[in-house]
Image (cartoon, helix red, strand yellow):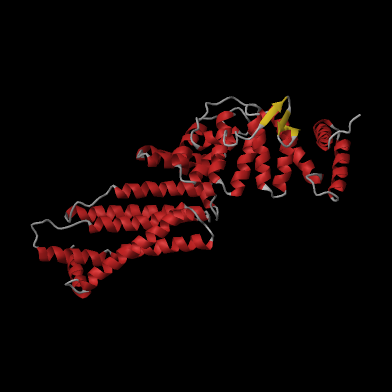
Amino acid sequence: MPKPSRFTLTATLFRRRNALWLHGSAEEVKTLRTRECNRSTNSSKPRGFGRCVAIFCAACWLVACVGGRGPTPAPYVPDGDSERAATRFADEPSVRVDDFVVTGEETATASELIANAHWWWMNGNLQRALQGFELVFRALPEQPVSAYALYWAALVEEQAGDHRAAAGDFELVGARFPAHPWAADASLRAVRLWGFLGDWGRAGGIARDLLVRSRPWLPVERVALRSARALDLLERGAFDAAEREVARGRRVVDLAGLDRLPVLPRDLAQLFYAQAELDRLHARQLGFEGVDGDFARRFEQRAQLLLDAQAGYLEAMRAHDAHWTTMAGYRLSTMYRDLHADVMAVDLPSAVPAHRRELFRAAMRLRYLVLLEKAASLNARTISVAERTSTDSAWVERARVQARELQTTLDAERAALDNGPFTRVDLQRVLDEVQARQ
């Protein structure tokens, strides 16, 4: 009789282990755990207690798949990255034979492959773990086990820092397996990751679908969905609808008392950021057409909206999250820069003598130079926080670009004041006289 191969023995042993974990008595499970723990001290292969824990995770999944089926909601249809996630490893050969997955290197059941992937994950080898989970998803794309494997693949990708791939895979779990017990949680994770990446359209689309489900969301989860929806609406210019979503999110926060915590949950940072963005965009709509009786009123209204937005951005920073702090700091700096640009675009009518118009522009340059200095200070602080926390994102790069532009503008404004026909003392006297008449 030919001697069985090492893999045949290993596969047989795995099936016996799985049977004991799933159907064995408490005494048999205890004996198996003791035997595996004793064996793990003499082997560097993926065995021992780590293997047992991994197989136990697979057993928990099997129980969940057999017993946990909820109503089928209308799925959000994914596109782009989430569609590519299902096929990006399609060129690697694998064949399904009954409950076995056969590749060029091994033959194993789905539960064995998942157990292996869990073992690699627990031992810090994220690449091998990801390969194992994605192998199961690729070989059994329509089976319930595939949802479990894809969910874990997304978790590994998120841990490895590949947020875009993780968001696409989480989104795909919710779209392809809407009745799976983990579908709602996967979709919520996709909302958070797309929001982290600044793709409000994707985040808001999934959030819209999740909000109509009957699941009793936790307060922080509902805040995450409402704020993602609000930011999506703001990006599309639907200010009134966005304001309603923000108000609903604030109502959840007030009822649950979430804003009274010393450190805000990260989902609240997104809500306060959405509120600040709403105020900022409202402020940009208040332009200045000229220096008349309406200029002072509009400037006061815009300054108030700027302060309201600033309060929202500062609340978002209370989450002590480097990513949201960077975003909020960049937007704060941008607000002051935009206000300075809009004010300096105001000019006197062409009928006013050129000398008076030049004096007016110089006085405005002196008076509102502080806005540029404030913008530069906030931007520099944002970059400092990002460097101190080792944060590297598109928002940090935007802040660095803006820092260079602000410095160029500041140098130009200061040079215009120093080289102009009017001294700073003369200009300040003119400003004081105008202020006295008002």
Q: Along the line of sight, which residue is nearer the eye, 211 or 432? A: 211
Number of numbered callouts drawn:
0
Q: Which residue is pictured at 57% across the width and 42% down the height? A: 166
Q: Position of residue 309 (x, y in %)?
A: 38, 52
Would residue 427 be seen by someone viewing this image from the given angle? Answer: yes
Q: Along the line of sight, which residue is nearer the eye, 90 or 122? A: 90
Quadrant showing the C terminus: bottom left
Q: Quadrant of residue 219?
A: top right
State left or right for residue 93 relative to residue 206: right
Q: Residue furthest front?
A: 2
Q: Position of residue 22 (x, y in %)?
A: 80, 32
Q: Along the line of sight, which residue is nearer the eye, 87 or 19? A: 87
Quadrant showing the N terminus: top right
Q: Which residue is pictured at 75% across the width and 41% down the height? A: 54
Q: Position of residue 358 (x, y in %)?
A: 15, 65
State left or right for residue 22 relative to residue 417: right
Would residue 254 be seen by someone viewing this image from the given angle? Answer: no
